[in-house]
Image (tube, grey):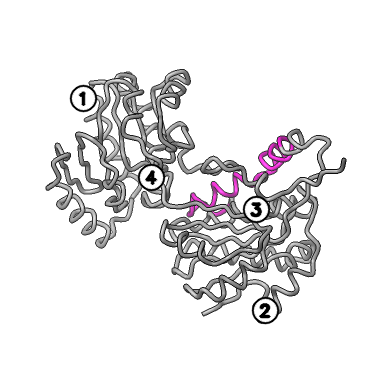
Amino acid sequence: MMKLFWPKNIEIEVAIEQLSSNQPNQPFDQEVEAFTQSLSKRFLRMRELPEVVALGYWLRKANIKEMQTAFEQGTVQKIIRSRGTVFHIAPSNVDTIFVYSWMLSLLAGNRNVIRISSKEQNGLNVLLQIIIEELARTEFQKIAKQTIICTYGHEENTTAVLSAACQTRVIWGGDETISSIREIPLAPLANELAFPDRFSLAVLNSDVLSKLDEVQLDSLLEQFYNDVFWFDQMACSSPRLIAWCGDNQQAVNRFWKAFAQKIQQKQYELMAATQVLKYTTTLMLATESNVENLKNGTYFSRVTLSNVPVDVRERHCGGGLFYEYNVDKLEELADVLIDKDQTIAYFGFKREELESLVEAISTRGIDRIVPIGKALDFNGVWDGQSFLTSFTREVVII
């Protein structure tokens, strides 16, 4: 059933008609930039929701200006226009992702229709309330008239109506969701960005790790905790496989012992359903021939693998389940990477070593290699696609 959050008190058909009657903006319009700053200030105050604070930090003035400078440098002497209307279909596992997608489209000058998940999410409700309050302000009326925010179930007719009204469709979701929505046609000139299920990992050099003092190790674990538990290991870029390079087992044991203490310090809330799912998943994995060792702890479980078969990725349940895999050299990791693998969070390697790994990868896999602590950082290039490029078009005059 359709629920319209913005605009209020009108039917969706009327909202689409009104939206389409408003002209798109030039890229990096002043009112849009002011809107991003206003949202940034409010998000930065939400200390109880660190993922929303991270969103506010991304929206800060310096970052927006940096994006604008890079965009303008890349489009010198070109005539760039927005594509028109962008339809964003948000995922249910990361409640902030629709804002990133919407803001980049807005900065590109587009009108926007956002379908958020119908799944109940506390963080999303708070986020949505702030956005609606900002849209209602007099100084942001142009943006308010260029925005529709709604939710509905799996009604294909509604998706078809919204798809027909857009020039770009953005799908965030699982593989099945994307396949299902792709059966619904777009207008002939429309383009589409799809962000399916992905799998991510972290790789640590145990020899470098062994040289950290207690303060340095604590700092690393703080960053690792954020990568893993901000979205309970359900974000596509959260590390699920931990690859160890080197043979310093004492450093590995010290890492996991200190990580258990870090989780306790953070007062991470153990959910009974998650614990049961994690426990049953590890028990089922224990019957597999490629599982060398299994340890179920209070806060997380560790499953040591002798290789990384494709289907083990599909069986991961999140919530603090870590596959572990050992390599002698970083390049050996390339042998187990597949198309589905997205982000590598790293510690203890030089850039040249990471570049050699990229050279060794023969599959479509890996779009991001970032330091531990940056796995969830959003960027205008995601899964190898530039949003600002995809959200605009070039007019050629000869």
Q: Amino acid at mark 2?
A: Glu
Q: Amino acid at mark 4?
A: Phe
- Depth-wise, is mark 2 or mark 3 nearer the camera? 2
Q: Amino acid at mark 1?
A: Gln
Residue drawn at (48%, 74%) of the image:
153
Q: Nearer the viewer, residue 199 or 372?
A: 199
Quick one: label 4, few (<14), some, or many (20+) residues within 10 Å?
many
- What is the number of the mark on residue 13? 2
Dots 2 and 3: beta carbons under 8 Å? no
Count of marks overlaid on the render: 4
Which SS type dominates the magenta stretch?
helix
Does 62 lie within the magenta span? Answer: yes
- Depth-wise, is mark 4 or mark 1 nearer the camera? 4
Q: Which residue in the protein does label 1 denote? A: 249
What secondary structure is marked by label 2? helix
- What is the number of the mark on residue 199? 4
What secondary structure is marked by label 3? helix
Residues in magenta?
A: 45-70
Mark before the other along the chain sequence, 2 or 1: 2
Residue 26: percent from the left, percent from the top? 80, 51
Residue 64: percent from the left, percent from the top? 69, 43
